[in-house]
Structure formats: C-alpha cells, structure tokens
Image (cartoon, grey):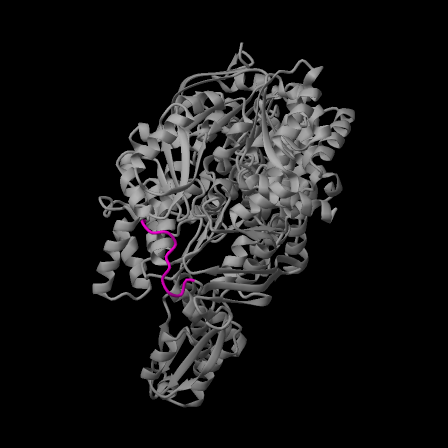
Amino acid sequence: MKASRVRAVACKEWREILRDRLFFTMAFGVPLLIMLVLGYGLSLDVKNIPFAVVDHDRSASSREYVHRFSESRYFDLVGYVAREKDLDPLLADSRIRLGLVIPDRFGERLQGDRPARVQALIDGMFPFRAQTTKGYLEAINAEANRELLVDWLARSRGMTRERAVQQVTPVRLQQRYLYNQAIESDWSMASGLMMLVLMVSPPFLTALGVVREKESGSIYNIYASTVSRGEFILGKLIPYVGVSCFNILVLWLVATQLFGAPFKGDPLFFFIASVVYVICTAGIGLLVSILVSTQVAAVLLTMVITFIPAMLYSGLLVPVESMSPDARLQAWLFPPRYYLEITWGSFLKGLGWSDLWLPVVVLAGYAAVLWSVGFLAFHKRPRR
Amino acid sequence: MPLLQITGFHKRYRRQVAVERVDLSVGRGEIFGLIGPDGAGKSSLMKAAAGVLSYEGGLIEAFGVPLDSETNAERVKDRIGFMPQGLGLNLYPDLSVEENIDFLARLREVAPADLARRKRRLLAMTRLERFRGRAMKHLSGGMKQKLGLVCTLIHQPELVILDEPTTGVDPLSRRDFWAILTDLLRDRGITALVSTAYLDEASRFHRLALLHQGQVLDQGTPEEIVSRVPGRLLSFRTSQPGEALRRLQGRYRQLDYDGHRIRVFVTATGEAAALDELRRHLGDLPVRQLEAGEPGLEDVFVALLRGRGDADREGVPRLPVNGRSHRGGEDEVLIEASGLCRDFGDFRAVDRVGFRVRRGEIFGLLGANGAGKTTVIKMLTGILRPTAGSGRVAGADMRRAAGAIRQRIGYMSQSFSLYRDLTALENIRLYGGIYGLGPGLLQERIDWVLEMAGIRGHESDRTAALPMGLRQRLALGCALVHRPQVLFLDEPTSGVDPLGRRRFWSILTHLAREQGVAILITTHYMSEAEHCDHLALMHAGRLVADKTPDALRRELQQEVGELLELQLDHPLEALERLEGQFKGVTLHGNRIHLFAPSLSAAEPVIRRLLADTGVELRSLRTRVPGMEDVFVYRMGLLEREAA
C-alpha cells in the first residue's frame, strides 16, 4: 500500500467531483434536497382533518356539538350540507376525511335526558390516519359526554360544577411526553431523515463513481497499471466519505436550525458514529459497483437496497417492535435501524457513548464486512 | 524469446466464444497488427495480453511471465502500456490535458523530474503543448487519441498494446499517430501490438494477423500474406459493361463494377499472364484503360473469407449492368446545400457548407468524428434547424417542408435503427407501415427489399441474431421501402467486415446506376471513398475539398509529385536522411513512402542518400496515391495555414 498512489487516485476523484456538474449536484445538492422534500412532506402528524356536517336538528345543542370539533386544532370544518347523500362526493374527492350526521331532535333528546346518536363517516383509505381520526373523534365526544354529565349532576343533585367534575372523573390521568415533549413528529422526522439521506447518498456516489469508470473504459487505466486494488478502492472512497462527512454537518444544521429539532446529546460522539455509518453505507455502494457494470443498473440496485430498508425497516415510520416477524428480521439485517437508534438517542434523549456504544460497534462490524467483501470481489483481471 | 507469446488462446463470454485457438508471437521491436472487423475478437485478445482480462484456455506469456493469474499479471504491468478501445474513453473528461497525464504518471510512480521531461517531449511530439490547460472533453477526436497515447506512454513501457487507436480519427491525426509510433520504435525500440479495423493501415505493420470471428485467418508480414493469394487486380473501362460482366461473372468471384470501371481479381501468376487470361475471356469486346495492379490486403482478406465459404453464405451480389443511366433528368439536382451553418452555443459545428448531388450520383462526405458530417445530414433531413443557409432535398425546401422531405428520402444511421427483437420481415413491414404503404404495394416492396438486400431465407430470423452484414443490408432495405429518390447514409459500414462492405457497396452502385437514386454517404474508410463519384472532405465544420476522386488524385500529383514506395532492409536508419530531402516521408513496416517529382529524377538522389548508410534498397516503384494520401496532404496545408 503506497500513500502516493492512494493520493493520486483520491486527488483525481476529488477534481472530478468538483468539476462534473452532475456529480457535484449529486454529492452536495441531492442530500439536501431529499432532506428538505421529505422533511416538509413526510409529516406524520394528523392535524386539520377536513370534515362536513349534516345537521338535521339545527338546534343550539347540535351547533355546540359541532363547535367542539371545529374549534379543535385537529379538525377543520369545511361546511354544512343538506343530506347524507351530499357527503359522498366530498368524501370520494378527498375534500373531507370525516362526515358527521346529527339526527333530527338531537337537542330535544339531550334536553330530555335521553341518549342521542351521531353518525361519523371516516375515510378509512389510509388506516393510520383513520385510526388517529377515530381517536380524536372519541376523545372529543367523550369530553362532550362528560360535560353533559357534569351539567346533569349539577342540575339534579345541586352540586357545584367543581364537585360534579370530580364525581365524573374519579381517576385523573396525568400525562407527560418525554424526549419529544410537544410530540412534534417533525423533530423525530428531521433527525430520522439524516439516517435516510446518509443511507442513500454515500452508496450512490460510490457506486456511480466506480461504475462510470467501468462504463467509460477508464477503469482499464487502473487494471493495466501497478496500482493495487486496495490502493484504488481506498483512493476512490476517501473523497466520497469526505463529501458525506461534510454532508453530516449540513444535514445536522438543517435538522436543528430549519426543522427546529433539539440536539441534547454529545456532538463528538454523534459525529464519530455518523462517520462510521457513512463508511458503512459507502461500502454498500462499493459492493453494488462490483456487481453491475452500467450506471443505470447501479442507480436501480442502490435505490432498492438502500432506500427501501431505510424507509420501511428502520423504525422511522413504524417502530421495529411493532413490525411483523419478517419485517423485524429485515430491520435487524440492515444498518439503518442501528443508526436511527443513535440519532434519536443523541437528538432527543441526550444519550452518548455509555448507552449507544453497541449500535456503533454493530455499524463498524458492518463496515468491516462490506469493505472486506468489496476488496476481495474486486479484480483487476475480470472475466468480462 | 519473443516478448509476447500467445499459444492456443481461448476466450468465451458465458457460452459465446469470442476467440478460439489463437497462436501469435510478437518479437522485441516489432509493430504487430491485429486486423479484423467488429466482433472478430481483437479486443478480448488485447485485454488478455495486457493482463486485464482472464481467459479460459491456452496461455499468454509476456516478458517470459505466464499471465495465468492476477498475481502473475501484476508482475509485468509496469512494463506494459495499454490503451483500450474508444476515442479518449480511458481519459477523464473533466481533467485538463496536463492533469490527465499527471494522474497516469502518479499511478505509475514516475519520478517528478522524469515526468516533466517526458511530458515536454511527448506534448511537443503530439503538438498538444498549447492545450496543456484545456479540459479533455473540449479536445477534438484526433487530439483525444493523441492524449490517450501520451498517457499510455508516460511510464515508458517496453510493450504498448493499443486497441483500435485510429478508429474514428481523421487521416492527418492517424498519420501523426503512426509518426509517433515510428519515433518511439526508432528511439526506444518499443514493441507494439496494435489493432485496427482499417485494412489500408496494414502496410504499417511489420507483421500482422487477420482475425475473423475469433480465429486467425492468416498471419505474417504484409508481403507474405499478399503473396499467399497470388493474382492481379485488373481494372478496365468498356462501352458494353453488361456483356463484359456476363462473360466474366461465372469465372471470377471477385468482380466489381462501380459504373465507371470493372475491377476483377485474376488468380494468375504474373501480370502478363493475368492480362492475357482476361483478354481471352472478354474476347472481341472493346476495352479501354486496362490496368493491372497488385492486390491489396483487402482483396486478400476477401479471398481468404471466400475460401472459407463465408461468401456463399452471404450470397452472390447482383451487379449493375448499365453504366450511368442516360435517362432524362440526368442532371437534376436532388440534394442542394448552400451556406449551411449550425451553431451549438458558441461552437460553430457546421460553417458555410455548400454542395450539390445529382440524380444517380454517389456523394461521399468524409471527415473525422466531430467534423460536422452528421450535423449536415440532420439539417438536410429536416431533423435539425440550420442557423443560417438553405437547402433543398428532392425538390422540397429543408426549412419549410421537413415533413415532405422525410417522405421522399431514406435515412440509415450508424446504429442501423432496426428493432432487434423483431424478425427481418417484421422490420420491413413496420417501416412500410410508417411510410403508409397500402397492403398491395407493401407486398411488392417487401419482395423487392428481400431480393435487393439478399435476405431471402432469413425473413423470419430475429434481427439480433443476423450477422452484421445482413443486418446492415436489412437496415438499408428498410430505409428504401418507400422508394425514395434520395438516400442518406451515415457511416453505414462501421464495423462490418470487408466482404460485407463490398456487398453493400455493390448494392449502392446498383441503386445509383439503375434506379437513379442520389446517395449521400459518410464514411471513415478511405478505401470506400474511391467508390464515390464525388468526394467532399469536412474538417472542423468546413468543406475542404469537393471533387471527383481522380481529380483529387491528379491535383495531388501535380502539386507534390508521384508517390514512391521504397523497400529497404533497415528502413528506420534511412528514415531521417530521406526526411531531409523529400516530402511526406512515412514508414510502412519495412517500406517507406515519399513524394517526389518523378521516379527517374528521385532514384539517383535516393541511392546517393543511402549510399554510405549500408541500407540496401531492395525495390523502388511508384504507387497510385490513395484518398488518404490526398486528404492528409490537404489537411496538412490547412493546419499550416491556421498555425
């Protein structure tokens, strides 16, 4: 292993990254773009659910009931319609996600202390959103019931309202959210997206960097020269890992400054762990570049083996614990879930070396395996 | 002990055999040529010899080291320089000329002082000195190729392996390339293994091997190979070409007629015997300008292929029976360009180009990659709008009636534009449908195409499985399915073997002479240029010459004299002396070519120059200059003007 030859390869590669406009964009623009697009687009918070009402009663009670929904931050009243039938086109067009039908004599029944029925039509197309909607709906409805009960107690037993409230809710739940106090999914998402971007971008750069030389034929300069495969691989990967380390800082700034995610952990630990992760994912790119010989194939293969696991099996959208056994196996197989543990640990929980050393070791192990396989599978005298 | 020894070499890709049972040896200080069409197996052989491709059978030894494993191959790589196929493809487009060289030098650990010295020398030799700082992607094709050569030579390898270094390069750059190789041979005793698809470069080699479909057809010195197929190439004019062809057709298999001259290869020993034999067969027919020449390597290649029975598989070509037709409208201009310009940003790709092509005429547009040939064709066919200038094709204005033009022309591109997964017949049908032929007419045209292109028997073969030559003729047939009066052919013969190329050209002459089709063709093959009625050379977007091949040749002879060929026992030692005295001195294997006012005047001068060198002049004779000589001379003049 000669440092001079590694340096020659690395310098050449670095110049190409800076001068090739497409490659430059790939290296510095695309990671930022993914972060911004997904950061703004992929919010898991369900807020402002649009809904419409059919009010057959048109009484003060029915208006008050509807008002409970329209003034909450979770629902957005689109308007009233005359008949149930009129809800169908609105739901079909996704202009509303929820339809409330309040029957005739709703207020009258409540005044007479008789139960009334309200029908809720929920758009169940996207189960996650429907579940959340149902939760909000039930909570608001329960609140309405509770107040009716309080009113009734106050009226019939002559209690004060405070006393009545205590009677109605004997057990009081005190909730506090830890780590992400405001349960802003943007916080978790922004830091989680660092995992995604750093899973996708380094292998793309590495795979394309090697494969484009294969495709053009300049790889023969390497094959035909006295550069050893180790020197070539190292020289080739140093610039890409370097670029990705720079991107770690940029993405970290975006997550904390633009998306307002808090960073509570040890910055040095997080940076070192991130570098290990980047080395590991660049190794995936190296493997891809050995398997394929055209840039198109490299893009497709890299996309499939990086984006999908990072998106679906990392725990970003669905916690690993609540996945099906098959999905959980996949989660254990791919590196992103370990880095996500590190990211959320560092950003939200303020953890450091003592708690997160294991995932770092696992990632380092991955990197070692990927690079060794890449090194052994790279030949200067291939079959074709 | 030869420097490179190849025995029983065998290479396959999955189940497809690329090269089988090849034996070669390259001695120290030799320039060895591998000649063959695309797919002959040249690249596989060269890559294996450079130690960058593993192989299945046989053994390659370089410098006495068997290249049978990656470890062994590494042992000789510091002594080998390898330039893969493709113009500048092994270079880095975004790096400058100097950075490209520096990178390759650092890979090879050339000491800084050596690097500076060699860089200076090689850049001067290749005239790239001025372009040190220019990014490689902004170089012309010829310059890229020279830079590739510099990068391959920067570590001073003892053996250079160059895969098609001259493909797609203009004739002048090709000449430069050979001059550099000659210098290296003289100064360093370098050994070179060079492949080429151009048979007319064969004379440059000391020894060569003809490769076809993965096998060596023949190998030896150019003289040896030519002498193995004894015979003479005779050509003549006659007023009754149809009758002459009828009388010769059964007897000679290598028979050509381009509308002017009939060429026939007569396998008789000695010129007199050959001429006698031909006269006997022609009988009482009037014959003019009967000339006898030595067969070129291409004729030999074709003869060797015919010997293997390949020719029969390709079918017997139909020759035109009339000379240039004298029907009405003979002088009708079918393609006319005047003052055509096209800019791409700041770059002027085509600069004031103007020419005319008449009915029944074959017009050849020659030039290197990037000279602007394809851009001219695209403008004339209405695909690309010109920045300035005008053109008419088959009576329609190219600016206004692009749609009408496309109905009246046939166009065939380098890539053959066929659907590889369709059968031959389906492809013809498809093109018939595109041009809107009715069912009755379509059947008639299909029959005509099958006949004309000699595809009968292959109608239901998948296009991808057809041999290159057949595929090329099928593409031609598809371009002609709607009976256009104008035909544009953009490098239609790239990568096709000589037999296929000949067959193709016989169809073209037939179309022009019999059917009055005006043909515009671009090609890299200078030997094909001879078949054209009219030639134009493009260089850096401009038209440099526009005349008949004979007129161009005569002009050259008037301006610089006769082309002489000297055969010498030690040509390298004579080279420098001759360069001082004559123009256009070039080394061709064991021979030297030069220009002199006349043979009789030059002979005493040459003998005097060589007298005290001990070099023996074995023979001296005049040669008919080829189109390549013409264009190298013309472009040389232009470059000097520019400088």
Q: In this view, does B505 lie to the left or right of A173?
A: left
Q: Residue furthest right?
A: B113
Residue B157 image point, x, y percent: 63, 22
Residue B45 image point, x, y percent: 46, 26
Residue A335 image point, x, y percent: 51, 40
In the figure, residue A383 lies in which quadrant? top left
Magenta-span inclusion, residue A72 = no
Q: How many labels does the image show?
A: 0
Magenta-span inclusion, residue B328 = yes
Judging depth in this view, the residue of A169 and A17 nearest the camera is A17
Task: Read off the magenta span.
Answer: B321-330
| Residue depicted at 51% across the width and 29% down the height | B202
Residue A6, compared with residue B5, is above or below; it is below
Instruction: Label the magenta part by its dominant secondary structure.
Output: loop
In the figure, residue B581 lies in which quadrant? top right
Q: Is residue B348 left or right of residue B433?
A: right
Residue A314, compared with residue B621, is above or below; it is below
Judging depth in this view, the residue of B28 and B538 nearest the camera is B538
